[in-house]
Image (cartoon, rainbow, N blue to C red):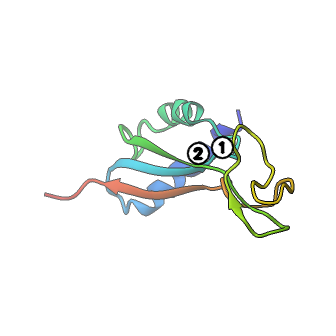
Amino acid sequence: MHELPLTEDILRIATQHAAGKPIIAIYLVIGDLTSFVDDAIQFYFDLIAPRTLAEGATLHFRRVAVRFRCRSCETEFAPVNHDWHCPACGALGGEVIAGKEFLVESIEVATEE
């Protein structure tokens, strides 16, 4: 359910930057550590986009994998099978350097012909 206000923000951001032109596509970047579900965002978008500049627009999702930097040895790594131990030194977890992203990367608007 938390995807509805998020999707409203996506629509608001896209329409603000569309400069009054119809929106063809919205490109989103979502980190794997977020709890956001692509299908839920799409569902809410399909409900709220009609009668806006984004009516009929396509959402494109790009997922960002989780990456850590070990606090003990500075090794950067991606967890494998939810094992968050550093492969170099065995320390648990570390600083999250990727995977928490959520942003509107770009929008595509109709060009005047």
Image side of residue 35 versus residue 24, left or right: right
Which residue lies under the disc numbered 2? 8
Let me know if residue 104 appears in the view.
yes
At x 51%, y 37%, the residue is 45
Query: Decide: marks 1, 2 in contact (CB < 8 A)?
Result: yes
- Residue flagged by tag 1: what amino acid is it? Pro
Residue at 75% over, 54% down: 87
Give 24 or 15, whichever is nearer the viewer.
24
Question: Crowdedness of circle 2 by 10 Å Cα count: few (<14), some, many (20+)?
Answer: some
Is residue 53 rendered to the left or right of residue 44? left
Residue 97 appears in view: no
**Image coords of residue 11 (percent x, y):** 51, 48
Viewer-side residue, 32 vs 42: 32
Query: Which sits in the foreground, 71 or 27?
Result: 71
Q: Mark 1 points at which residue?
A: 5
Residue, x 51% and y 34% (percent of image)? 42
- With 92 as the anchor, is 78 left or right in this view? left
Residue placed furthest toward the front? 88
Q: In which quarter of the image is residue 96?
A: bottom right
The residues bearing labels 1 and 2 have C-alpha atoms spaced at a distance of 5 Å
Residue 41, percent from left and from top? 57, 37
Three-letter code, disc 2:
Glu
* Residue at image coords 80%, 69%: 73
